[in-house]
Amino acid sequence: MITLKNVVLRRGAKVLLDGASVTINPGEKVGLVGRNGAGKSSLFALFNGSLHEDGGEYFIPAQWRMGQVAQDMPETTQSATDFVIEGDSVLLAAQQEVAAAEASDDGTKALSREHTVLVSRSGLVTVTGGKWTTYRAMAEDVLSKCMADALLPHRPGGATLKQLLVGANAGASNPHPLSQASDLSAYGSEAAAVEALPGAGRQLAGGLTEAMVRFAVRHEYARTVEDVLARRVRLLFLDARLAGSLAAAVGAIVAEETGCDPEIAAFEALAAKYLHLPA
């Protein structure tokens, strides 16, 4: 235990403690509060041995180790955040690995798309890398790591393993093949919402309707032609020539919906690259 008995502690002519007595037993948690200059830092200096009592008795077991954070940062050009993070050896090692991969221009795609879960000695959990399309697996790995490191109590995982996504039809046995262009069946339970939009009866080409483009903008955050033809209906990857020919028509709808530049020329240039095999 830590014991102070009738301790007197001075800083110059100022008396900070006068006849103070306290006993702190193992396992007890004590908070020390007081205004600036009241002697909080001086008391801890007594505990770590850099100050000695001016009177009374002070005792701390010789085998006890004391951990503390300095009140002031040393002179450095680093920011306070960088200075603190530098003390996390696990995170620092991960950052060095990323920096080495970026410097060699090799493997950075894998580093960014594959995720790693790190737990520091202080219990800080860090997730590096990953991508939106695997966020459920990332979240499960984080929880598993936290349970393995006793940060969370153990419990069965996989609560969202069979969670239906937006638009999914419960019990559907015929999912839309990724190798086929999107049509109305690909929207599942949201098909009626697509049909209710302007242009539901206007076919642009390849199964794509004007209403599907409007739905992509209004409900799927599409903002450019590439968003629609590559990321929402995948036509760029199935028929790049057809996708390129639709850029202007799709761009006009996106511009009407958003009032922003749909980047038609950029998509036409991208589609043209898909028409040629790499050298």
Image: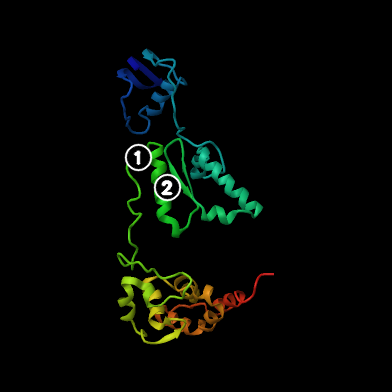
| Residue 271 drawn at (x, y percent) | 57, 76
Task: Name the mark on residue 152.
Answer: 1
Residue at the (54%, 80%) spot, across then down: 244
Residue at the (33%, 61%) spot, across then down: 164
Q: Residues within 10 Å of mark 2 (few under 14, many from 20)?
A: some
Of pointers 1 and 2, the one earlier in the residue sequence:
2
Disc 2 marks which amino acid? Asp
**Above or below for 29 versus 218:** above
Q: Residues within 10 Å of mark 1 (few under 14, many from 20)?
A: few
Dividing the picture into quarters, in which one does residue 57 lie? top left
Q: Quadrant of the C terminus?
A: bottom right
| Residue 177 drawn at (x, y percent) | 44, 70
- 10 vs 134, nearest the viewer: 134
Residue at the (41%, 82%) spot, across then down: 209
* Gap between marks 1 and 2 measured at Cα: 13 Å
Residue 11 visible in rendering: no
Classify mark 1: helix, strand or loop.
loop
Disc 1 marks which amino acid? Leu
| Residue 138 drawn at (x, y percent) | 43, 51
Residue at the (43%, 36%) spot, across then down: 122
Dividing the picture into quarters, in which one does residue 23 lie? top left
**Above or below for 135 versus 19:** below
**Mark 2 — residue?**
141
